[in-house]
Amino acid sequence: MTVGVRSPRLRRYLPFAVSGLQATLQYRASFFVSLATTATSTAVVVFLWRAVYAASPDAGPGGFGIEGITTYLIAAQVLGVLHANQVDSEIGQDILRGDIAVALIRPVSYPVMRIFTALPVLITNLLMVGLPTLLIFAVLFPLQSPAPVDLLLFLAAVPSSAVIAFSLNMLVGLCGIVTTNIWGIRIVKESVVVFFAGQLVPLDLMPAPLAAVASVLPFQSMVYAPVRLLTGRYDGASDAAVILAGQVGWAVLLAGACALLWRVFVRRVQVLGG
């Protein structure tokens, strides 16, 4: 009975997923641009850190070898591609243009609608940009081969990582209900997340005070935690369970914050434009 009630509700959101896929595939050239920019930025980061570890290829700073740090950085960049769902920008534009008014009168949940719209973007980014980037650098550099259990743990950590990224972007987008324009908030968010998630600098290499701050923020669950599992930098099954549980906890907490913020702010929407 429960399944029969929920299925029609979920079917309401399928057109949004189809629309998101069509919009994503409409400009196929953008994938080549994204792949080029992602590969270039990844190359800059990888060559920089490989130069740092050139003098100690087996065991350098933070306990990384040159293959280990290369694997970490490439996996981190691929996760960064997975997190680029543009939800914050789209919500901000809905508010700025006044399209949010149309969303409010639809018989669907706006946050859930955004999830379904973002799913095709997430999947196509991963397939068209993330995986090709991984293959390019796997050909160029020797990487650390993960143990099967580490790979499985990484794959188990990826969904929570994506939920956290989506929730953070939605929270930033919903700030537009108060600030109207979220451009500045987005820039600050992107800088803070990239740094404290460990996408450019692993937490192991940060000064102790910064690493302590990063370890209690949700951002490290987006990149550092999954890549830590992939590279086997955890202490047994209990430590892996703690890492995964921390991710799930942040995902649930931030998703709940989105739902609460939407309910509180929806009454304060000021529609701009015609």
Image (spheres, rainbow, N blue to C red):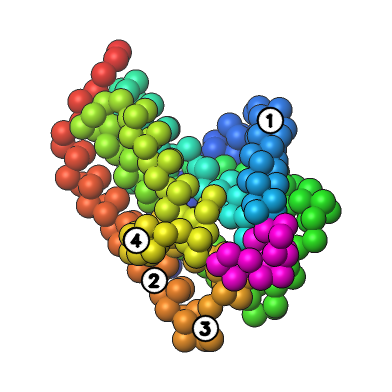
Three-letter code for the amino acid on which mark 4 is drawn: Pro
Q: CA distance from mark 2 to mark 4?
A: 20 Å
Residue bearing mark 1: 33
Who is closer to the viewer here, 14 or 36? 36
Question: In the image, residue 169 lies at what x, y percent?
Answer: 39, 44
Image quadrant in which the C terminus is located = top left
Near mark 3 (Cα within 10 A), the count class, few <14, some 14-19 or many ≥20, is few
Question: Do callouts 1 and 2 mark residues in contact (Cβ within 8 Å)?
Answer: no
**Mark 2 or mark 4, whichever is nearer to me:** 4
**Mark 1 or mark 3, whichever is nearer to me:** 3
Question: In the image, residue 161 lies at what x, y percent?
Answer: 48, 59
Residue bearing mark 3: 235
Residue bearing mark 2: 246
Residue bearing mark 4: 209
Question: In the image, residue 156 lies at what x, y percent?
Answer: 55, 70
Three-letter code for the amino acid on which mark 3 is drawn: Asp
Q: CA distance from mark 1 to mark 4?
A: 38 Å
